[in-house]
Image: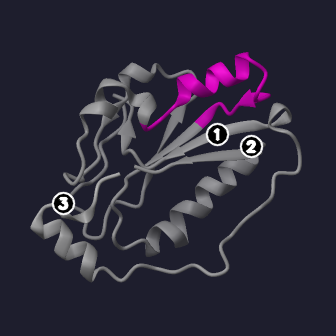
Amino acid sequence: MGGIEEFSLVDRTFLRAYRWRKIDPVPWAPLEKPLSDCRLALVSSAGFVTPDQGAFDGSMRGGDPSFRSIPSDFPTADLIDTHRSDSFDHEGMVRDPNLAFPIDRVRELVESGRIHSVSEEHFSFMGSITAPGRLVRDTAPEVARRLVERRVDVALLVPV
């Protein structure tokens, strides 16, 4: 794992000055059945979109709190990287979107019986949201509602 010294001066200064939120108690829901009986959905902050969806708005102050719905059967290779951050190398996730949106690995887990099923809908958010108020207040509850509607037992959060 790299250290803060690997970031640009601008990013290091921002990270040192940023007022990180502390959430206490941490929300937690224990899994009440085996994964082999669960339906799983992916929730990634990779900023991926499908070709027919608009890119995340990289100019929005504090970050774009919206999300994109990614169909379960969408070809992984066709996902488009619209993540706004230049503080990490995007090359790996562009070459293999499974690094940030591991839907092919999830499909393999279903095929092997390790997971019962996969949701027909997954969610992509923009990472690097420095003002998360709208995300917490508006967007996250909408995605949670949709996950409950689709009877998802486990949401695999994939931070980027």
Picture residue at 64% right of the left edge, 19% below the top: 108
Residue 47 x/y as whole percent: 36, 45
Q: Residue at x 40, y 79 (%)?
A: 20
**Which of the two residues, 16 or 43, is positioned nearer the viewer here?**
16
- Residue labelled with disc 1: 41
Q: CA distance from mark 2 to mark 1?
A: 7 Å
What's the amino acid at mark 2?
A: Val
Q: Is residue 110 above or below residue 46?
A: above
Q: Quadrant of residue 120?
A: top right
Look at 30% across and 37% down and name the residue there. 81
| Residue that carries the numbered disc 2 in the rendered image | 152
> Is residue 134 shown in magenta?
no
Residue name at image x 31 percent, y 63 percent: 63
Q: Secondary structure at mark 3?
A: loop
| 135 or 4, nearer to the observer | 4
Q: Is residue 102 in the magenta section?
A: yes
Q: Which residue is most to the left?
A: 9
Q: Earlier in the sequence, mark 3 or mark 1?
A: 3
- Residue 7's disc number: 3
SS under mark 1 = strand
**Residue 1 drawn at (x, y percent):** 35, 51
